[in-house]
Image: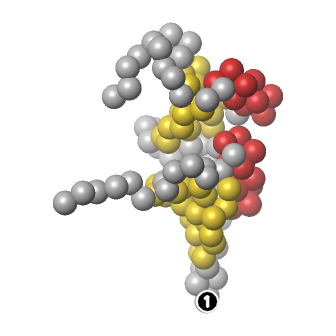
Amino acid sequence: MEFKFNHNNINVFDLEKSVAFYKEALGLVELRRHSPADNSFTLVFLGDGNTQHRLELTWMRNRTEKYNLGDNEFHLALTVDDFKAANEKHRKMGCICYENPTMGIYFIEDPDGYWVEILPARRTSLPNP
């Protein structure tokens, strides 16, 4: 039996703001969108164009306030081929929330407070797990 990653899901308060953020910050594009007949929620699947992995954004129509992320220990992680250019872009966007130069990584924060770890495609300071 073999399992393969399919997608991760996060709930978002402002769907269009989140879709725009992930497009600008990470180059993720909308692959498909689904809403039931009663329009009670909308699912948007984003992809990177290189892998089959998807990020599913869930928007609930009746939600009136942002989600409480608690300690927010959950995060996504993406690699990038031009780490320096990505860091400069995210710095200009003002979305870098934590940097660890010793480990050669940093995190950005999306509109809902979720953190996304950015790693160089070729890491020299730490081995890949």
Is residue 127 visible in the rendered structure shown here? yes
Query: Which residue sits furthest left?
Result: 1
User: Residue 110 at x, y = what percent?
Assistant: 65, 43
Is residue 59 visible in the rendered structure shown here? no
Instruction: Establish if 67 lies above or below 63.
Output: above
User: Residue 43 at x, y = what percent?
Assistant: 58, 69
The residue sitting at 19% across, 60% down in the picture is 1
Q: Viewed as shown, does residue 104 lie left or right of 17? A: left
Q: Viewed as shown, does residue 42 lie left or right of 102? A: right
Q: In terms of image quadrants, where is residue 6?
A: bottom left
User: Residue 49 at x, y = what percent?
Assistant: 61, 52
Q: Quadrant of the C terminus?
A: top left
Q: Which residue is mark 1?
A: 37
The residue sitting at 68% across, 20% down in the picture is 84
Instruction: Establish if 37 lies above or below 6.
Output: below
Query: Which residue sits furthest front?
Result: 50
* Count of numbered labels shown in the rendering: 1
